[in-house]
Amino acid sequence: MTVQFGNPDRPNSYIGKTVPRPNAGRLVEGRGKYVDDINLPRMVHVAFVRSPFAHAKILGIDAKEARLVKGVLRIFTGADLAEVCTPWVAVLAHLKGLKSPPEHPMALDRSCWVGEPVVAVVATSRAAAEDGAALVEVDYDPLPVVADMMTALDASTPVLHPEIGDNLAFQRLHEEGDVDSIFAIAHKVVSARFKTGRHTGVTLEPRSILVDWNPAEGQMTAYHATQAPHMMQTVLAKHLDVPESRVRVICGDVGGSYGIKVHVYPDEVATAAISKIMARPVKFIADRLESFTTDIHARDHEIEAKIAVDANGKILAFDVDDWTAIGAYSVYPRTSAIEGNQVVNLCGGPYDFANYRAKTTVVFQNKTPTCQYRAVGHPIAVAVTEGLVDMAAAALGLDPVEIRRRNMYADDGYPITSPAKMRFEGLSHHQSMDKLVELMDYDALRRDQAEARARGVHRGIGIASFIELTNPSPFMYGIGGARISAQDGCTVRMDPDGSIVALSGVTEQGQGTEAMLSQIVAEGVGVLPSNVRVITGDTQVTPYGGGTWASRGAGIGGEAALRSARALRDSILEVAAAMLQADQASLDIRDGHIVDAESGAGRMPLEELGRIVYFRGDTLPEGLPRELVQTRHYITSEYPFAFTNGVQASYLEVDVETGIVKLLKHWCVEDCGRIINPQLVDEQIRGGIVQGLGGALFEEIHYDDEGQLLNGSMADYLVPMAGEMPDMVVGHVETPTKESMLGAKGAGEAGTAGAPAAVMNAINDALRPLGAQVTQMPFTPERILRALGAIED
Amino acid sequence: MTKVFADRIDIDLMVNGEPVEARVPAGQHVIDFLRQELGLTGAHASCEHGVCGTCTVRVDGASVRGCLMLAAQLDGADVWTIEGLSDSEAIRDLQEAFIARNALQCGFCTPGMLVAAEELLAQGGVPERAAIREHLSGNYCRCTGYEAIVDAVETVARQRAGQVQA
């Protein structure tokens, strides 16, 4: 029996409704439990002495003074931790040629970026640990620094890791069709150079971990702010030599993640290693400077790209040359080559064209490592693609909406394999564009823009279509050898009073995972969502799963929940049929009652069934299965990824005197397949858009030529604040994936994928009459004034 | 040691309507005192230099950055944190509006956001959306994109002004 999604009046119709989040109530009362809220008996704190140099030999460490600080208990060097913790190498077999040297939890004899942990000071309080850390003397001999991305491979640039030969971490060239010939004969060729600003996630809760190794029990318990508890269980088990069954990762409330908290960080593994040595709980909470210097960075790309179009605006070819620098190490275990690889996979994504060349060059440098951050690679690929499409439209005198309509894949033409060899099961570019144009009243907005221009006010409209990779299969990481689960599981159980508990391998960091799961399980079993208690984030309790990343929570975790809930429903009905002497097919469960499926007449509350099964099983027929716990796992198999699509629009005003951009309004229409909770999806889109707007207008990590990070505080690194952000209109088209019963694809990253391109195109739309164009993010007042020729030096 | 150079200070204050006496390190910030000494973990430390607003608590009626004020300055103060504001039901309508509008995701900024929003609402009237945005600009949220928060605060302002039913 399948769920009749098309019938809104079906019984237990919670999938598709806005229901409140079960965890919101305690969070608004300050009753959340984040890692730093947890204190354990005998707990100690660790602070790290970090490299002040981007590249230096460590000649010696003198901790005599530090040991005298009251409260300081132990001091560890990289060599001390290497005795209990094996190093890791972050490569994936399917990213051919990717290389990276072994990395230890703390530097051994050389530091490779400003912020790399060198010495750990453990004390009875964080304050004492910091006081001790300040007194540790490290004798450094500075080495030549690789700071510039574009010269990293030059013969004159020193090689950062001599043992791996050169500064090239990874390179991939993908070519389809006859790109050079097309560019030679095309009606119009437009090229541009794009830069996306190196930025970071700025989770308000800094990275946090509390590890408690109990040698008497042989168990390691890690309270960890993470998106992937089972991955961390596997990593800690492997590198600290503990069986996986003896590593318990508990992930309670997490104060923002966005991809920042899905990686293995050296200082967090160091904390676990120290706990294993000291045999007591050790807490590490990053401070804000540590967050800026050691949380992964992302999006540091420079791209030379061109588009070829015919006289009608038909796209003939894209040619993209992408460069990115990833810091000193590829990040474990997802690697730092994925972002560049995504740029190759995603450029030109919405469009039906035949000739494609894309190359990514990924180099090492002496900066903080980069890795996957919300919408991995998409903001870059979408900016390049949509920037070029707008430039081509302008060169041909075509309207930006019209050129897209002429090139987007037809909604009825799926399945399709793109020139980048991405497989699309079903997308809705045209429907989405139609809806966007209607929502924003495009023609009226163009009139408003013209009227403003007549008054000397420079407003711009920017459109950005996009595709978005969600629901990844093992093709993302598993086939490359990474022990990262693409499968996820859910256990659903009925307790004696008829209430339901669901234990899921996907996790909650505020997206609404637990609300979404409660709705699915409620509908699947036939109870009220408020009667479903969802448990996530405990590896010793929940089925093994991947966690929450790459917009997989609803599509994969949700499907596992639906299947396990349906299985429990079947088990309950099997018992009910025996108790009621009825045909199982004639019974249903609605609002916590066994009912006659035909008439809806109540036959028995679940509570009564629970009483009999748990306490009077003697009254049931011998041999009758009474398994009121069911577990199901789900993995996608027909498509490597479930692509979603959408289109965004930005309306803004550029002050040509100051270069300041004022966002007036923003629209997004997206298609994430089946929507489980409309409000949660809308708010994921809005939050995602604003992270994209941050990248477009404000966010940029600055380094000097010596690899010193220059803006390591929230006062110096700007993120969107309430005052500058626009109201956002969100609309949907629903094209469910046919791979699953649920039909859900991901929604968490679409906002971030398209927003920067929409803003770039809007700014350039505003500036075009003035002959100016910007392509380097973030679009700061200075860059806009330079483009206008108002600043020169 | 003379009082001038004392590294520990005695303070006597009210926290969430309850009397508190404590001897605090001279360098301890309000947020660390509340979280570590009193177990009031609702407000959070994040940027630790007065920018992000997650540590916002109410001291003598005003929104204060718990990371910029010293615990030693609290002698004689009347402090309210999210725990006390919840127990007293003082901002129940605002909390309900945040839940209904999903004006929180990870919840880390929320306790500070609520204190800051209540400071604006306590001024009475129905502020313009731009004024709400301006007032909350010292409280960062990385999850929601702010619109839902502005909606929730606007809704409560209207409810309190009697413009709509609660």
Image (tube, helix red, strand yellow):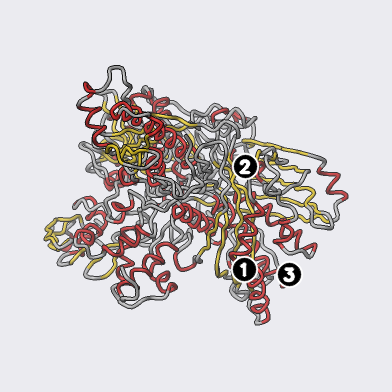
Q: Amino acid at mark 3?
A: Gly
The image shows residue B17, relative to residue A419, as above or below, that is: below
Looking at this view, is A644 or B111 the one in front? A644
Q: Amino acid at mark 2?
A: Gln
> Which mark is nearer the camera, 2 or 1?
1
Residue at (34%, 29%) from the top-left corner?
A582
Label 3 sits on residue: A771
Q: Which residue is mark 2?
A: A342
Subunit that carries the residue with mark 2: A
Viewer-nearest of discs 3 and 2: 2
Labels 3 and 1 in the same subunit? yes
Instruction: Confirm whether residue A47 shows in the render.
Output: no
Rendered location of residue A210, percent (x, y):
31, 38
Tell me which corner region of the image, top left, top right, bottom left or bottom right, holds residue A608: top left
Q: Where residue A641 sits in the image (x, y, percent)?
A: 58, 38
Q: Nearer the viewer, mark 3 or mark 1?
A: 1
Up/down of A405 relative to B77, above or below: above
What x and y, as percent, mark residue A148? 62, 47
In terms of depth relative to the viewer, which is nearer, B146 or A206? B146
Please give left or right for residue A139 compared with residue B33 in the image.
Answer: right
The chain identifier of the residue carrying mark 1 reads A
Do tag 2 and tag 1 residues touch (Cβ < 8 Å)? no
- Name which residue lies at 50% across and 50% down: A200
* Dot placed on the residue nearer the N-terminal end, 2 or 1: 2
Q: Which mark is residue A441?
A: 1
Q: What is the chain letter for disc 3? A: A
> Left or right: where does residue A536 sit relative to residue B84?
right
Neighbor class of circle 2 (other Cα within 10 Å; few <14, some 14-19, many 20+) is: some
